Amino acid sequence: MSNMGKIRRDIGEVVHDEMIMKDRIAKILNKGPRTIPELAEALGYPSHEVVIWLFAMRRYGEVQAVGRPDVDGYFKYELVQRQAEGAQ
């Protein structure tokens, strides 16, 4: 389902989708680092909505920026690798 051609959604609607979208974003990032535009294309949602979901994940330590920005100024993001529970 693509929302790219629809009228801009209310921020409350976008935030409401956060839990569902973070799982979808994680699934994409499991395949390798992606920029915000790459994630938006893969998800079928506009970049401004992906920014909200991705930065929430970043705030909670689930993703991180890697490397240097590309020629358009976009960083790639990857999932943060966590140690296995009970390791050490």
Image: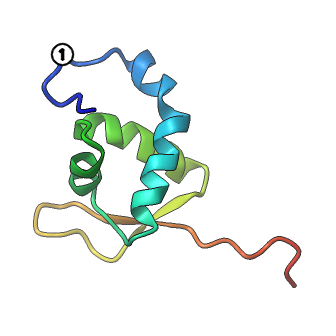
List the single residue furthest toward the front: 1
Residue plotted at (38% across, 72% down): 32
Residue 74, position as x, y percentages in the image: 22, 60
Quarter that holds the C terminus: bottom right
Can you tell which quarter of the image residue 48 is in?
Answer: top left
Residue plotted at (31% across, 64% down): 34
User: Between residues 29 and 50, which one lies in front from this camera angle?
Assistant: 29
Task: Count residues near mark 1 (Cα–Cα under 10 Å), then give few for <14, some for 14-19, many for 20+.
Answer: few
Vertical order, 3 against 34 (above or below): above
Quarter that holds the N terminus: top left
The kind of residue on which mark 1 rests is Ile
Pointer 1 residue: 7
The secondary structure type at the circle numbered 1 is: loop
Residue 18, position as x, y percentages in the image: 50, 34
Left/right of residue 16 with respect to residue 31 in the rendered view:
right
Residue plotted at (46% across, 58% down): 27
Residue plotted at (85% across, 80% down): 87
Residue 12, position as x, y percentages in the image: 44, 16
Left/right of residue 61 with respect to residue 18 in the rendered view:
right
Residue 78, position as x, y percentages in the image: 44, 67
